[in-house]
Image (cartoon, grey):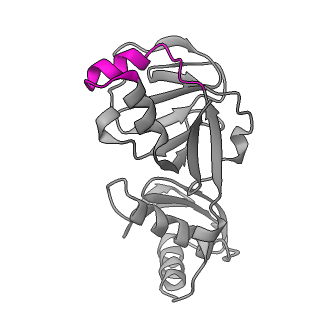
């Protein structure tokens, strides 16, 4: 665990440098503990880090680091895992890149669909656009690189994969992910880091 300066009144707290559920749970635990501190104005959790915006009128970087470490050293359970909900995403697997993904991984289309729906995914980060949840980890058997040239328009509701992650486009957007299906799911603002997402074939 280490700190890095982000701006005059914000810091990054890193828990590691990989994508793993263990690190995400540590991020979640820290997020819930630090929310109790009035000196912290805002936080954004991500894959293995926590962005922390603090009150510059009360602390400098050294004193806020000391306060954070003191708070995190307390052996209190935040029960953050119980707050993580599971969101089911009804999906039609009819995407224009479904065959590309199958061919890249030497699988049938049905195998790609089965592998995509067999597991639930964690929300590791929200970014790129409002409601765009980065979901991991994808089964390595269907991992497929992004397109070298992004499309000028990916439609809202597109279910896509890129490398070892999957996602849903919350609105029309340019993008280079592989489109494998579509969903009529609408409540993209309900995604929170740490939540679980389950794709269900329809």
Q: Nearer the viewer, residue 94 or 40?
A: 94
Q: Quadrant of the C terminus?
A: top right
Q: Residue furthest right?
A: 187
Task: Tell me if 169 is positioned left or right of 105 in this view.
Answer: right
Name the residue located 37 percent from the left edge and 57 percent from the top edge.
20
Q: Check residue 125 for magenta coloring.
A: no
Res. 59 image quadrant: bottom right
> Residue at 64% of width from left, 44% of height from top?
88
Queried whether the magenta region covers residue 96, the answer comes back as yes
Q: How many marks?
A: 0
Task: Give residue 162's position: percent from left, percent from top.
Answer: 40, 30
Q: Quadrant of residue 56?
A: bottom right
Q: Quadrant of the N terminus?
A: bottom left
Q: 62 or 65: which is nearer to us?
A: 65
Image position, residue 196 (x, y; %): 57, 53
Q: Position of residue 163 (x, y in %)?
A: 34, 33
| Residue farthest to the left, as pictured | 106
User: Where is 126 relative to 175, above or below?
Assistant: below
Q: In the shown orientation, is residue 15 left or right of residue 182?
A: left
Front-lying residue, 104 or 35: 104
Residue at the limit of the structure toward the bottom, as seen here: 75
Residue 24 location in percent, x, y?
A: 46, 61
Q: Is residue 59 visible?
A: yes
Q: Which residues are magenta?
A: 92-109
Nearer to us in this view, 60 or 128: 128
Q: Residue at x 57, y 60 (%)?
A: 9
Answer whether residue 13 is visible to the viewer in this image. Answer: no
Vertical arrangement, residue 94 with respect to residue 58, above or below: above
Q: Is residue 129 left or right of residue 1?
A: right
Identify the residue shown where x is 56% and y is 39%.
199
């Amino acid at each position: 665990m280490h700190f890095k300066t982000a701006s005059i009144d914000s810091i990054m707290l890193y828990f590691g440098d990989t994508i793993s559920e263990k690190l995400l749970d540590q991020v979640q635990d820290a997020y819930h503990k630090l929310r109790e501190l009035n000196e912290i104005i805002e936080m954004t959790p991500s894959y293995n880090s926590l962005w922390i915006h603090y009150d510059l009128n009360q602390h400098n970087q050294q004193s806020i680091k000391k306060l954070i470490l003191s708070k995190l050293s307390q052996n209190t359970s935040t029960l953050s895992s119980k707050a993580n909900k599971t969101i089911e995403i009804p999906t039609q697997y009819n995407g224009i890149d479904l065959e590309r993904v199958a061919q890249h991984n030497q699988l049938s289309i049905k195998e790609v669909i089965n592998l995509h729906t067999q597991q639930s995914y964690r929300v590791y980060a929200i970014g790129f656009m409002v409601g765009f949840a980065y979901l991991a980890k994808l089964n390595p058997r269907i991992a497929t690189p992004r397109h070298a040239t992004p499309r000028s328009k990916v439609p809202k509701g597109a279910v896509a994969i890129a490398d070892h992650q999957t996602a849903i486009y919350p609105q029309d957007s340019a993008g280079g992910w592989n489109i494998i299906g579509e969903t009529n799911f609408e409540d993209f603002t309900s995604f929170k880091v740490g939540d679980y997402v389950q794709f269900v074939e329809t």
